[in-house]
Image: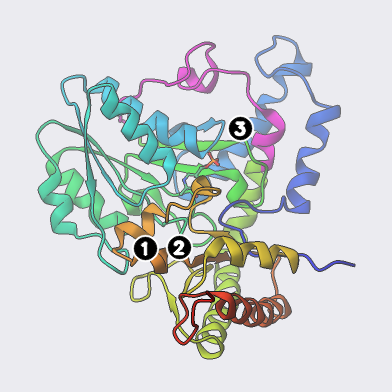
């Protein structure tokens, strides 16, 4: 059988068999509408209640503080949108240069609509300057939106400390915790955030379901308006099977967190150590910063990441260049550029992200493949020191 190694778990994850099993009855047996007056529909509510308990338990929230959305992107949009609508006189937003496009592009759109956005810098390891966070918040700042962990580099931001700053200044704080879920413990009370976004497909559940935590007492205005679902905070008929799957995935992620973190960290560390030892002119992007245990973002000098990814694909290996959203263009990743990486090094960067279904022999196989691939590409590249450009 052709080799298949999936090292792109930050892009999406396989649906866990336990999650699929939990969802199945809700496609063909229990397919009613939870808002119906008869039991065939209304009895589904007790399952939604159960799933809401599972996901809120996963993040240390109360069930009333959690709404289901269609994805992480919607949750991010909804949090920022609500802060602006509930504070109509405040028209300034603080975020960072390294956010996921679900925050970054939304903020750019808001700028086009007349809002003002400050994009915070990061240092060359991808870290934020907390003093800068403090300085950038203004009396007219409606919300600060800063991710918990970066999807490209795995760099973790000190969300609890940022929360303190925001609280002191009396400004709402949202964190995109999509990548942190299942890889770091998440407790909304300890983090002290007002809003937090999660997406199910990064924790072994299907794509197309997410959640937004809204701290009790925080005013909320919905992004999607229509029916009375989610207590009037998110209209649209509940995606029952996916909600059930998300609940199960959250329960599994909570149970597995400790063991899973040490296992993926072992794989990631083995991978990085081997690469640095065996392939010259390689660097770990985000080195020196606190990072997620599962993410390796490697800069291979003198190669183009697109070529590496293509050859890896031929060897049955899934990995990605820093930014899935710019695939196809030659623009280097906005995250790596914000870190001040040389554009050449940024263009040679590849992200490998490990997950629950990966193992050690896959790591060794990919390291072996990479040795050959990088050597081959460098031998052809006029950029490689010692190579003379063919004329
Ligand atoms: C994947 C991801 C999202 C988007 O989530 P979707 O459910 O795919 O919309 C948002 N933020 C981060 C950090 C992500 O990694």
Out of 370 and 256, give the one closest to the viewer: 370
Mark 2: which secondary structure? helix
Residue count near mark 2 (Cα–Cα under 10 Å), binned few <14, some 14–19, many ≥20 = many
**Image quarter hosting the N terminus:** bottom right
* N-terminal-most mark, 2 or 3: 3
Out of 104 and 234, give the one closest to the viewer: 104
Q: Residue 379: give x, y in percent of width and height.
A: 58, 81
On the picture, is 213 further left or further right than 31? left
Q: Residue 335: give x, y in percent of width and height.
A: 37, 56
On the picture, is 47 further left or further right than 1? left
Q: Please name the residue shown 32% across and 39% down the image.
A: 194
Q: Which residue matches tag 1? A: 343
Mark 1: which secondary structure? helix
Q: Is residue 354 visible?
A: no
Q: Which residues are magenta?
A: 216-245
- Which mark, by number, is residue 347? 2
Is residue 343 placed above or below 194 in the rendered structure?
A: below
Disc 3 residue: CB within 8 Å of ligand 1? no
Marks 1 and 3 close (CB-CB < 8 Å): no
Q: Is residue 310 visible?
A: yes
On the picture, is 340 further left or further right than 74? left
Q: Which residue matches tag 3? A: 49
Q: Residue 92: give x, y in percent of width and height.
A: 19, 32
Q: Please name the residue shown 37% across and 75% down the image.
A: 287
- Residue 361 magenta: no
Q: CA distance from mark 2 to mark 3?
A: 46 Å
Marks 1 and 2 close (CB-CB < 8 Å): yes
């Amino acid at each position: 059988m052709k080799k298949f190694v999936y090292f792109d778990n930050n892009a999406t994850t396989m649906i866990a068999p336990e999650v699929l099993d939990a969802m199945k009855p809700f496609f063909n047996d229990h397919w009613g509408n939870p808002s119906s007056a008869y039991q065939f529909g209304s009895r589904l509510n007790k399952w939604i209640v159960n799933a809401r308990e599972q996901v809120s338990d996963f993040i240390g929230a109360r069930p009333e503080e959690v709404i289901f959305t269609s994805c992480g992107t919607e949750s991010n949009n909804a949090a920022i949108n609500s802060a602006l609508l509930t504070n109509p006189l405040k028209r300034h937003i603080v975020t960072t240069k390294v956010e996921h496009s679900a925050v970054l592009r939304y903020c750019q759109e808001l700028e086009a609509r007349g809002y003002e956005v400050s994009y915070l810098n990061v240092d060359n390891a991808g870290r934020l300057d907390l003093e800068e966070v403090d300085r950038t918040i203004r009396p007219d700042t409606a919300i600060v939106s800063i991710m918990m962990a970066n999807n490209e580099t795995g760099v973790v931001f000190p969300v609890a400390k940022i929360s303190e700053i925001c609280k002191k200044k009396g400004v709402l704080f949202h964190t995109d915790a999509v990548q942190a879920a299942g890889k770091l413990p998440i407790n909304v009370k300890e983090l002290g955030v007002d809003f937090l976004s999660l997406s199910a497909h990064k924790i072994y559940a299907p794509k197309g379901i997410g959640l937004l935590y809204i701290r009790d007492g925080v005013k909320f205005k919905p992004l999607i308006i229509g029916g009375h679902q989610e207590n009037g905070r998110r209209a649209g008929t509940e995606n029952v099977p996916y909600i059930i799957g998300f609940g199960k995935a959250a329960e599994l992620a909570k149970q597995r967190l400790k063991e899973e973190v040490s296992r993926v960290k072992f794989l990631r560390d083995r991978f990085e150590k081997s690469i640095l030892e065996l392939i010259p002119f390689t660097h770990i992007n985000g080195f020196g910063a606190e990072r997620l245990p599962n993410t390796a973002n490697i800069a291979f000098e003198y190669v183009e990441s697109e070529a590496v990814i293509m050859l890896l694909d031929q060897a049955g290996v899934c990995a990605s260049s820093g930014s899935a959203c710019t695939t196809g263009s030659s623009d280097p990743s906005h995250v790596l550029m914000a870190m001040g990486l040389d554009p050449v090094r940024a263009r040679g960067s590849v992200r490998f992200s490990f997950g629950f279904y990966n193992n050690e022999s896959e790591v060794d196989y990919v390291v072996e493949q990479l040795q050959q691939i990088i050597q081959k590409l460098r031998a052809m590249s006029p950029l490689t020191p010692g190579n003379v450009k063919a004329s």
